[in-house]
Amino acid sequence: MDKKLATKLKINDDKILRADLLMTIEQLSRQEAVLFASKAVCDFAIEKAYYSPIIIEEIKNTINSYQQGNVKISSMRSLALKLHDLARQSPHPLTRAYYRAWGHVLAAAHVPTHAIVATDYLVYIVNLNAPQNIDAVKAIRQHQLSIAKKFSSPKIND
């Protein structure tokens, strides 16, 4: 199996939909990958009790500033590392996974394929809530794929 298709997370996933999503993400620019992953995480419903709205607002503001060219990749990386520290400190697996998803959204500014890892964490959350519900996994992967396709711009070959 191609290393890029593998995930370190132990998740019950739809391998075909994930592979399709990865192929779509690989065609995105850094900015598109960040926008896609941000939208995928924003569309994912999780109770506010599991995260700090202030932190999520900081992330969204940073992403908006990045898209406008006002934030450098190093700042995105610093915030991603801050989120991973928050995840490590959290006792609840939903909180850990949600913060890690956002951390990978930010990391997509450096390496666009971090966006797939962000979506893997969302599948992990689905697995935590409904361990054997492959239909729920397929639904989220299909939604993610539809979002990614909206952000992918046609590439012109010269």
Image (cartoon, helix red, strand yellow):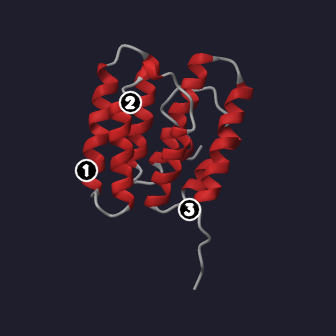
When asked about the image quadrant of residue 100, the answer is top left
Residue type at numbered disc 2 = Pro
Mark 1 neighbour density, 10 Å: few (under 14) some (14–19) many (20 or more): few
When asked about the image quadrant of residue 124, the answer is top right
3 vs 1, front mark: 1
Residue at 71% across, 34% down: 138
- Which residue is labeled 2 in the image? 53
Seen in the image, is 102 located left or right of residue 131? left
Counting from the top left corner in percent of width and height, residue 42 is at 52, 39
- Residue 27 disc label: 3
Residue type at numbered disc 1 = Ser
Counting from the top left corner in percent of width and height, residue 147 is at 62, 50
Residue type at numbered disc 3 = Gln
- Residue 75 disc label: 1
For the question of whether residue 46 can be seen, the reply is yes
When asked about the image quadrant of residue 15, the answer is top right
Q: Are marks 3 and 1 in contact (CB under 8 Å)?
A: no
Sequence-wise, the earlier of marks 2 and 1 is: 2
The residue at the far bottom in this view is: 158
Counting from the top left corner in percent of width and height, residue 23 is at 61, 54
2 vs 3, front mark: 2
Report how far apart the C-alphas of labels 3 and 1 lie in the structure: 24 Å
